[in-house]
């Protein structure tokens, strides 16, 4: 390993901070208009003020309510409170990091330990 | 404000949802097997962080037309940074967390959502990036341009995967021709945004830690590469 591990740790911490700022702060400025897929599935219907299709014919009329729609973080909020998207985003970043980081750490190769010269001799 | 970004339950019929659920599980099982060779003490934390980063950036819907927005899918981004096998697992984890914790993307729609974004999107982005790898390895500009093109293409092809699913077992409500035309039209615009975000992110990582960019590592241009051991068995 050429790169000192301190610089690696610094990079990782910086990367995490950027993700937390995006999810925790920038998320307040995200567009609330339907995304590309929703725009297509809503085509043909007129919408009420909640964005739900009311009249006409469109794909979204077949959409079913989410089975976990009453969950504590449903719709990127905490308990349905609209002003909590940033906090919900931070929860999401940390949960995603723990799940993904944990899984990838368990799956990683352990056959080469750069700091252990004996292991290098085995190759 | 309703933040919903992925397919809900009910947009395709149950048999179609089941078939794509099986495809997703098989694809991820293969990915998990192959991902091991790309994961070590250095790249495993990187892959975890890239996954968290994709979750964060997917929250940021950007306007593409009056009344319509788009968000990152992340296929080319993860493929370039951590490779396609690890990358498809990254996107799948994001989709599972979004569906279970945030009620975004239906539970029975996980198969189609994972197929479209984690498998089709990631491998399309990777294919384009590999095709342009010589160009990407030549300069920072080449890498950034490659990331942009790979991301644009991955967005449109992932959208086409939805059209295929709708053709196979769509619940109805719009003609296939309309769905095709609108999905492609919207996702070309979204793909430009996806391209800008992907290019900026890959460019930023490459400027600080080029050794952590998977695409460059395989091209043999990044510093700090350990040569692969010949004949080594991986299990």
Image (tube, rainbow, N blue to C red):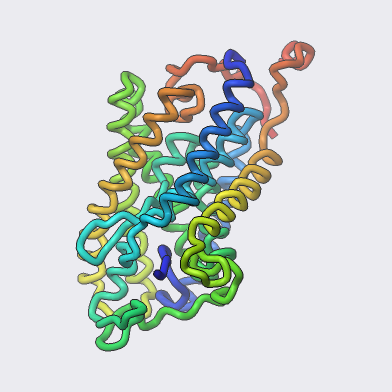
> In the figure, is residue B23 to the left or right of A97?
left
Q: Residue at x 31, y 33 (%)?
A: B146
Residue B173 quadrant: bottom left
Residue B38 locus on image (x, y percent): 57, 33
Nearer to me, B15 or A76: A76
- From what the image shows, is residue B122 above or below residue B202? below
Residue at 49% over, 36% down: B83
Residue B70 lies, in percent from the top left, at: 32, 57
Location of residue B167 by image quarter: bottom left
Task: Tell me the quarter of the image containing the C terminus of chain B.
Answer: top right
**In the image as oriented, which residue stretches furthest toward the right?**
A118
Residue A25 against residue B86 in the figure, above or below = below
Query: Looking at the image, which residue is at 66% across and 23% down?
Result: B232
For the N terminus of chain B, the quadrant is: bottom left
Asked whether residue B175 is in view, the answer is yes
Q: Is residue A103 above or below residue B224?
A: below
On the image, the x and y values in percent for residue B120 come to 41, 52
Identify whether A37 is placed above or below A17: below
Q: Is residue B18 visible?
A: no
Looking at the image, residue B76 sits to the left or right of residue A115; the answer is left
- Picture coordinates of residue A26, whole percent (x, y): 41, 50
In the shown orientation, is residue B162 left or right of residue A19?
A: left
Q: Residue at x 40, y 51 (%)?
A: B73
């Amino acid at each position: 390993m050429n790169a000192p591990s301190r610089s690696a740790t610094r990079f990782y911490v910086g990367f995490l901070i950027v993700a937390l700022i995006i999810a925790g702060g920038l998320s307040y400025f995200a567009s609330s208009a339907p995304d590309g897929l929703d725009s297509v599935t809503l085509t043909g219907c007129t919408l009420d003020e909640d964005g739900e299709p009311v009249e006409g014919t469109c794909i979204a009329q077949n959409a079913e309510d989410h089975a976990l729609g009453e969950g504590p973080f449903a719709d990127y909020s905490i308990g349905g409170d609209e002003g909590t998207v940033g906090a919900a985003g931070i929860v999401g970043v940390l949960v995603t990091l723990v799940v993904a980081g944990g899984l990838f750490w368990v799956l990683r190769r352990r056959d080469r330990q750069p700091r252990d010269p004996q292991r290098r001799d085995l190759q | 404000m309703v933040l919903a970004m992925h397919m809900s339950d009910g947009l395709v019929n149950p048999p179609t949802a089941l078939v794509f659920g099986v495809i997703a599980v098989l694809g991820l099982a293969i990915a998990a097997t192959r991902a091991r060779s790309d994961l070590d003490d250095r790249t495993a934390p990187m892959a975890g962080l890239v996954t968290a980063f994709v979750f964060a950036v997917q929250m940021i819907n950007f306007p593409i037309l009056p009344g319509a927005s788009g968000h990152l899918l992340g296929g080319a981004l993860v493929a370039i940074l951590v490779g396609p096998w690890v990358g498809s697992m990254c996107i799948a984890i994001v989709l599972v967390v979004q569906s279970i914790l945030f009620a975004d993307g239906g539970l029975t729609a996980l198969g189609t959502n994972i197929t479209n974004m984690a498998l089709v999107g990631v491998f399309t982005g990777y294919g384009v990036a590999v095709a342009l790898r010589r160009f990407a390895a030549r300069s920072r500009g080449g890498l950034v341009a490659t990331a942009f093109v790979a991301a644009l293409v991955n967005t449109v092809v992932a959208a086409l995967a939805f059209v295929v699913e709708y053709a196979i077992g769509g619940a109805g409500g719009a003609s296939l021709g309309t769905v095709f035309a609108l999905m492609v039209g919207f996702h070309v615009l979204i793909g430009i945004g996806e391209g800008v975000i992907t290019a900026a992110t890959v460019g930023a990582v490459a400027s600080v830690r080029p050794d952590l960019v998977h695409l460059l590592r395989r091209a043999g241009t990044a510093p700090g590469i350990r040569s692969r051991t010949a004949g080594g068995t991986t299990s």
